[in-house]
Amino acid sequence: MSKMRTIKGKRHGAASVLTRPARMNLKLINDPRQNGQTRRFTHWREVRQSRFLLPALIIAAMVQIIGDITLAPKTFDSVEYLALSESLFHNRGYSASAGLNGFHHFIGESPTRMRQPGYPVFLVLTYWALGRSTLVVRIIQLVMLLGSLCLVESIAAISLRDSHWPISILIVACYFPWLWTSCLILSESLFIFLLSMSVYFIARALFTPQRLKSSLLAGMTLGLLALVRPIGLIVSCFSLIPFLVRYGLKGGVRSWSVCAAATVLVLTPWSIRNLRSFGELTPISSESGYNLWASSLQKNEPVWFDNPQFQEATRGAYYIDRNASERFQRLAWRNFSKSPISLMKQGIARSVSAWFRFPGSGNFSDTMAARVLALIQGAVVTCAIVGLWNVPRVALWLLLTPILAIIVMQPLTPPVTRYLLPVAPYYLILAGNGIRRLVRYFPLRGQRNRGKGV
């Protein structure tokens, strides 16, 4: 009896020295009703595993400031976004002005379906309404990407749990190409922020009791995402997969239906506007025609004015307005019908090679720096592939959702590595897990060999 009291006393004493948060965490883990996935439990794990988040935020801020110093804010696409946002700011509706980017024969398009309206509206609020300063836009975009970094860490902590390597967030912060998107007047930074929010809310719907609320919020942010870039619709479709894996067929479809309904609701005003203006119920812009045509060309075939097909499609039009888009679509299907098998193989090869090219290195290709960066990118992708075998099934499909959307669309778009940047944080998290797996594997293998006398 005395022995039993002693053991009981030791147990009581050991439990009494636990801190209050630790006791709370232990209680939630042992509570079968909570199943270890409550909101409080997940939040506690996020806090515990975020010890590398502050250094990552500092590194990311420094990387973006370096980019602001070295990069010019305006690019070819920036002119289009500024022209569209200027029309909105001056109450001329969503229209494109004449003479864009050297197309002097283009007389303008009013109304237009050129580009999705999300980023032009963002520029109305941040550029035109705040003094027409690119510096203001850059600062706001810098803050958004720092917020995206926090969301990515939360996504990893919520979904991966014990499989998450906290140092991975430092790898994400050091990968400067995706962070330098904040330095440019381009839609990437807004797209990355909304994509991070969407994946975060999907993670909350999968791993916390707030399934309905989180699914609704995920659908709304996915709708906003699609208003920035059309590929947001593809991301919304692929988001069904993690719901099915987590909740099964019936529960997964029910939860995803809430998400999809919210996405459709957000896209409805833009779709109705296009129906009234152009007679087409479409939630996407008119830039798809050019992208489809560019993907239908043979290797090394020019994609600009030096191509006769480009001149044929853009006569009296801008290359992504609705008239040119229709012509580009006809030319694309004509090219595909001539050699479908070879173009299919070429598209797959182009898509695979894009993942192994360091973003932006095409500006100085065939140099030693480009080769070194290609090796780094290849190592990152290889580690991400290794990391796939160390991830819980639901978390794996969650992280793969945006990546799969990009992969599916790659054969139908030009081979531009910039298009892969929005999903960089997700394969970098997987790469971090792959690095940890390799680091753990090789020392253990060495110990086994020494034990055998090798």
Image (spheres, grey):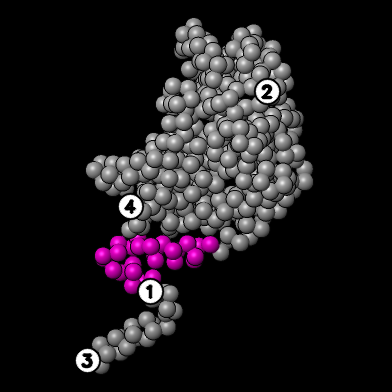
Q: Give the mark nearest the N terminus, 4 or 3.
A: 3
Give left or right: position of 171 versus 206: right
Q: What residue did someone put label 1 on? A: 24
Q: CA distance from mark 4 to mark 2?
A: 47 Å
Q: Tell which residue pokes out farthest to the bottom in this image.
A: 2
Q: Position of residue 282 (x, y in %)?
A: 44, 27
Dividing the picture into quarters, in which one does residue 248 lie?
Answer: top left
Tell me which amino acid carries mark 4.
Leu
Q: Is residue 61 above or below residue 353?
A: below
Q: Nearer the viewer, residue 2 or 256?
A: 256
Left or right: 130 in relation to 231: right
Circle 3 residues within 10 Å: few <14, some 14–19, many ≥20:
few
Q: In whole angstroms, how far apart are the C-alphas of marks 4 and 3? A: 52 Å
Instruction: Please identify, in this view, whether the residue under mark 1 or under mark 2 is nearer the observer.
Output: 2
Q: Is residue 70 magenta?
A: no
Are the residues flagged by discs 3 and 2 in contact, CB closer than 8 Å? no
**Earlier residue among tags 1 and 2:** 1
Element marked by disc 2: loop
